Image (tube, rainbow, N blue to C red):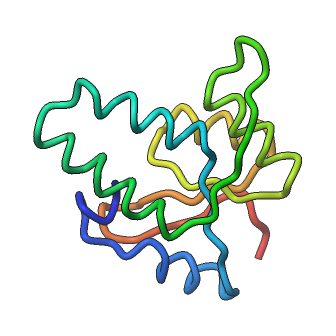
Amino acid sequence: MIPIRFGVDIFSEMAGLLEVVVEPVVMQSVLDEIHLLLREAKPSFSRELEFALKMASQCTVINDERRLHEKVDDSLIRIAMNNGFIVGTTDAELRRRLRAAGIPALYLRQSNRLCIEGISP
């Protein structure tokens, strides 16, 4: 939702920050969660969710299978760890958990630029 809220082009920012060709991916469980939120979202939030789905259409979708009683964030951490992924998030709690697991996180800083933590220069 960063592009619609803050006007940051996350795809070009990621490529510039990482200095490599980036293949953005999104987990199917994340898309499912967005669709669930859409069911009861107020109009302003609904527009943001629709935009998130539009952005996700530019990503490769990973058909993840969550384990029994596994939450989306737990699945995200497991898959990122197993595949060496960098996780983009604005969720402070998820960033803390990623840091504890040694998984690099891409996040918005000062409402205008992306930063990454967990990768040595």
Image location of residue 12, percent across then percent down:
47, 83
Residue 86 higher or lower than 17, as above or below: above
Relative depth, front residue between 107 and 37: 37
Residue 69 higher or lower than 16, as above or below: above
> Which quadrant holds residue 96?
top right
Toward the right, the furthest residue is: 82
Relative depth, front residue between 95 and 121: 95
Residue at 39%, 54% in the rendered image: 53
Image location of residue 21, percent across then percent down:
68, 86
Residue at 71%, 12% in the rendered image: 69
79 left or right, relative to 6: right
85 left or right, relative to 35: right
- Number of numbered tags placed on the structure image: 0
Toward the top, the furthest residue is: 69
Residue at 62%, 31% in the rendered image: 73
77 left or right, relative to 82: left
Image location of residue 20, percent across then percent down:
70, 86
68 left or right, relative to 48: right
Image location of residue 35, percent across then percent down:
39, 36
Residue at 37%, 62% in the rendered image: 54
In which quadrant is the N terminus drawn?
bottom left
> Which quadrant holds residue 42?
top left
Residue 74 higher or lower than 29, as above or below: above
